[in-house]
């Protein structure tokens, strides 16, 4: 294959922006004309629309997914002296949020199939100090929320879901973010519901948490100049909210396109030796924030280079599990499943606008390096990319 072809990025944001160009432009113009730029009518409407789409009582817009985690934790009363059980195989923002509220992340190992918290390891890690569980729905696949919620209920623990990578995903048909006490959403541009800058949201059925989150996002004050707690400047912008309202209308379709691309990959990669395709549990709707394969036999880095020769970008999320990062190293023992995953995972190009030609080139790149028989990509009936 020619090396002069367009490079396929892991995620290409532009085609999706082009697709909705007029609607997005109209949203921007509306905000510019309104003269209101922070926590205005678009933020309010967006909060209501997200709450309605997920079926929760409250949605509170904040500055980022990280702030959504921090404010959820603080709003649920978690702080110094408390332990929070979470996964080591996540973006650093997850344990960082726990540490930044003064609590301590307790890492437990993951399930090798879904890369998510292994529920069987949670209960043995619970001590008197444990106050909450923070499951992360990694790559768009739900954690085993049934067992996790059972453990939380039995032990009187709060559950904060990190939904940064899984907006639109479900477990047993229920939207992620609505199963625990709080769900933290991120609108970082690359996320499934991506904005045009930073943004995040807390979703909850808990009236008290919603009220506390509204106070904390605005310097700890319910009314102007009545600052009765130390909070944050973590408000959502009108421009982001107006643009995200447009994107929210297309989220389902966009997630379906990701699922379709994933099914296309699966059809061609299933059965290829030395590689495992993503697991989708029967109880989950995977929204493929990432399409992540495992490359076995220590050949991951070599294959990544080979793909690059084909003009195909790929990424490793995450090369170092959090318990081995500088900040946390030395405080934790070995977590072998997460450590093995960090050596083997490779995320391939995925997104709502990936073409069949793109998929073909990625598969060609993967297969050529292994001298395997190439089978054609097949899509499930209906729809189109
Ligand atoms: C992106 C991400 C976050 C942080 O979200 P920001 O909006 O970038 O602050 C937290 N957790 C996970 C798993 C993420 O992927």
Image: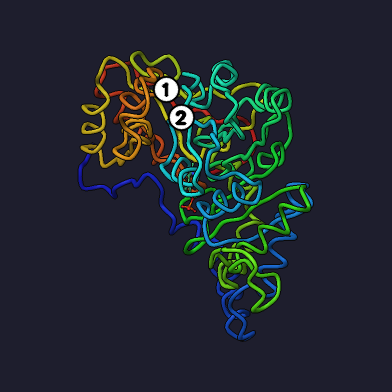
The residue drawn where x is 30% and y is 24% is 343
Answer above or below: position of 358 versus 213: above
| Rendering quarter of residue 58 | bottom right
Report the colour scheme: rainbow
| Rendering quarter of residue 384 | top right
Answer above or below: position of 338 versus 9: above
The residue drawn where x is 59% and y is 49% is 185
Image-based side of 164 in relation to 298, left or right:
right
User: Please, what secondary structure does the residue beneath circle 2 have?
Assistant: helix
Observer-nearest of 265 and 279? 279
Answer above or below: position of 31 versus 63: below
Answer above or below: position of 15 versus 378: below
Image-based side of 41 in relation to 325, left or right:
right
Badge 1, how many Cα within 10 Å: few under 14, some, many 20+?
many
Residue 65 position, x and y percent, is 53, 52
Disc 1 to disc 2: CB gap under 8 Å: yes
The residue drawn where x is 47% and y is 56% is 189
Residue identifier under label 1: 269
User: Please, what secondary structure does the residue beneath circle 1 have?
Assistant: helix
Mark 2 vs ligand 1: CB under 8 Å? Answer: no
Count of marks overlaid on the render:
2
Badge 2, how many Cα within 10 Å: few under 14, some, many 20+?
many
Observer-nearest of 25 and 320? 320
Residue identifier under label 2: 265
Residue 125 position, x and y percent, is 54, 21
Which mark, residue 231? none
Observer-nearest of 127 and 98? 127
Residue 141 position, x and y percent, is 56, 32
């Amino acid at each position: 294959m020619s090396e002069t072809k367009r490079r396929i990025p892991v995620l290409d944001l532009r085609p999706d922006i082009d697709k909705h160009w007029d609607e997005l432009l109209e949203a921007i113009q509306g905000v510019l004309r309104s003269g209101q730029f922070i926590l205005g009518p678009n933020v309010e409407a967006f909060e209501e629309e997200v709450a309605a789409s997920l079926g929760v009582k409250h949605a509170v817009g904040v500055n980022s997914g990280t702030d959504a985690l921090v404010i959820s934790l603080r709003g649920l009363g978690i702080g110094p002296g408390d332990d929070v059980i979470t996964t080591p195989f996540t973006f650093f923002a997850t344990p960082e949020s726990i540490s930044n509220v003064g609590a301590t992340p307790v890492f437990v190992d993951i399930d090798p199939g879904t890369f998510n918290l292994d529920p069987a390891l949670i209960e043995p890690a619970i001590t008197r100090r444990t106050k909450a569980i923070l499951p992360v729905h990694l790559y768009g696949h739900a954690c085993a929320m049934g067992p996790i919620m059972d453990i939380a209920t039995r032990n009187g623990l709060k559950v904060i879901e990190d939904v940064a990578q899984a907006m639109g995903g479900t477990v047993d048909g229920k939207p992620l973010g609505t199963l625990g006490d709080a769900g933290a959403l991120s609108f970082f541009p690359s996320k499934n519901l991506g904005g045009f800058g930073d943004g995040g949201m807390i979703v909850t059925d808990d009236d008290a948490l919603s009220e506390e989150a509204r106070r904390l996002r605005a310097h700890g004050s319910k009314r102007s100049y009545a600052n009765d707690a130390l909070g944050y400047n973590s408000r959502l912008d009108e421009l982001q909210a107006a643009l995200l309202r447009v994107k929210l209308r297309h989220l389902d379709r966009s997630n379906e396109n990701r699922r379709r691309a994933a099914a296309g990959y699966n059809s061609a990669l299933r059965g290829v030796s030395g590689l495992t395709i993503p697991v989708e549990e029967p109880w989950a709707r995977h929204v493929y924030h990432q399409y992540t394969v495992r490359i076995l036999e220590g050949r991951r880095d070599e294959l990544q280079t080979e793909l690059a020769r084909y003009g195909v970008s790929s990424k490793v999320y995450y090369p170092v599990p959090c318990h081995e990062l500088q900040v946390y190293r030395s405080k934790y023992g070995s977590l072998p499943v997460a450590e093995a995953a960090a050596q083997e995972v490779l995320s391939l190009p995925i997104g709502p606008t990936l073409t069949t030609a793109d998929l073909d080139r990625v598969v060609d790149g993967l297969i050529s390096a292994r001298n395997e028989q190439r089978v054609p990509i097949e899509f499930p009936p209906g729809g189109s990319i």
